[in-house]
Amino acid sequence: MNEEKEPLNFIEQIIEEDLKQSHSKDDLRFRFPPEPNGYLHIGHASSICLNFGLGLSYDAPVNLRFDDTNPAKEEQEFVDAIKRDVTWLGYTWAEERYASDYFQELYDWAVLLIKEGKAYVDSQSSEAMREQKGTPTEVGSNSSFRNRSVEENLTLFEQMKSGEAPEGAHVLRAKIDMSSTNMLMRDPVMYRTLHKHHHRTGTDWRIFPMYDWTHGESDYIEQVSHSFCTLEFLPHRELYNWFLDQLHDPKKLRPKQREFARRNLSHTVVSKRKLARLVEDGVVKSWDDPRMPTISGLRRRGYTAASIRNFAEGIGVGKRDNLIDVSRLEFSLREDLNKTADRVMAVLDPVKVVITNYPEGETEWLDSENNQDDESAGSTKVPFSKEIYIEKEDFREEANKKFFRLKLGKEVRLKNAYIIKAESCVKDENGDVTEIHCTYDPDSRSGSGTEASMRKVKGTLHWVSIKDALEIEVRLYDRLFTDASPDTHKDKDFMEFVNPDSLEVITGYAEPSVRERQVEETVQFQRLGYFAVDKDTTAEKMVYNKTVGLRDSWAKIDQ
């Protein structure tokens, strides 16, 4: 019986149609072209998974190309972070390229356009150019410098390149059509002068190409067959093609730009400018703060590469922008961690339990399965003693029949250990319970095979032995923004929606085996959620980030 194939998305349909009409399989080449002016975020992850996924599907090369044409904002730190993120997501690029690799070639082509009367040096101020460009409903007017001679344009362009011209004195513009309905075609800027240090070329260049000039020509140089961009670049396609028209060699493959819609995530901003502001204003500590939607932040929080890939595949690609609820990303994470994360015990809001009939000074080491759903995960030994911690919310003096945890006069099972019965409790001057006195059934140890061990009680609690517990710092995270779309309000700044309670730091107590866990390793604290070892962990103090709860705790809040 043949398995039914998944229907092709519209991007794959474009490729399949081209393979029928104009391309061979060997022509296919894709690229992921980030600008190294910040850390990649969850939106970039979708683009990474799309382009590298196509490479895997078609057995085609995918280049990692850095769009490094703005030395004022780009840094080697961001280049290194991007490479780490792509690698961590599980992808390998065919070639590592940089737009700066092509500065000379792009310059030579610009000179050619000047000689052909298709580009000119404009010396207007940026304000004057803005006014002269017109509006979407009013045509623009020609610059007074539009008809400079080829010789004067070449001289000025050379002065821009050498640094002889002051920064901002001139720009190079393509000579297209100031009356075009597409404002991007109204003599777009190709080059501007920047006397700044570039992370790769140093001070060799004093002029830097603009995105629209660089992007399509870089695709052409690399012989990229399909250049997939997000929907905001749809108006740029006409200009992408115009530049190719001027220089394209018919014997070479011509790149094709096509657009897909962004998949925006709720309660999040992904603009690099806004993410940078969160860092600069101290709302978060760094680009990889676990509250950030950056890939580095998600990784630090405990997200797995597989969960992000599965999320990207699940939401697919579309032709309309869409707001995806963050719960879908968290669902992908839970689904993956449920299969892969070891189970350990930790107590985050402890109350002391004294088992009065347990031998004084004795410690037992009990078997605890690392993952009940995966036999190959093995087991760990956990210590059990006379005094343990349980969660405060797991005890009530009195409760109705639906409360299946510990209450006076009733029994519960301690996970992997014994059945205990609450006999009495001690309170402080405020009436808060500080200590619970219980008895245990010594024949009821889990897995012992005795009749008592098979006795059914309705509640099972996690716990830790007090004398063996490891004190840990636990960072609990909530949404960074209180609004689902914080950056779409025209009358309000997105910072007004920052959640002041997005981070709570508490002290918890865990079974001693957690000391062996490595940075970024995620485990399930049983009955509490998934938690990852943070890089701030030291030999003296373990730090755990809450990755995600066992279920969507926000669903009811949002209703």
Image: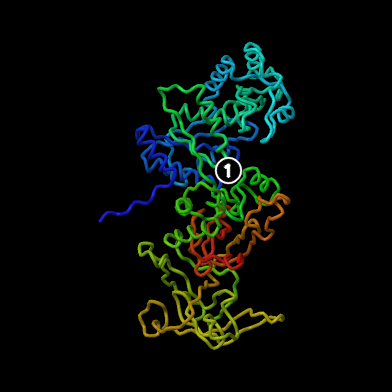
In this rendering, the answer to whether 470 lies above or below 402 is above
In the rendered image, the residue lying farthest to the top is 151
- The residue positioned 60% from the left and 24% from the top of the image is 176
Snapshot quadrant of residue 325: bottom right
Quarter of the image where the C terminus is located: bottom right
Quarter of the image where the N terminus is located: bottom left
| Residue 256 can be seen in this image | yes
**Few, some or many residues within 10 Å of mark 1 (<14, 14–19, 20+):** many
Viewed as shown, does residue 283 lie left or right of 69? Answer: right
Q: How many marks?
A: 1
Q: Foreground: 249 or 193? A: 249
- The residue positioned 47% from the left and 54% from the top of the image is 307
Pointer 1: what residue?
39
| Residue 516 can be seen in this image | no
Q: Position of residue 445 (x, y in %)?
A: 42, 79
In this rendering, the answer to whether 410 lies above or below 292 is below
Q: Foreground: 349 or 365? A: 349
Q: Foreground: 492 or 531? A: 492
Q: Foreground: 74 or 24? A: 24
Q: How is the image coloured?
A: rainbow
Q: Please, what secondary structure does the residue beneath circle 1 have?
A: loop
Snapshot quadrant of residue 110: top right
Viewed as shown, does residue 434 lie left or right of 446? Answer: right
Q: Position of residue 504 (x, y in %)?
A: 64, 62
Q: Position of residue 167 (x, y in %)?
A: 70, 24
- The residue positioned 63% from the left and 54% from the top of the image is 485
Q: Position of residue 225 (x, y in %)?
A: 43, 33
| Residue type, numbered disc 1 | Tyr
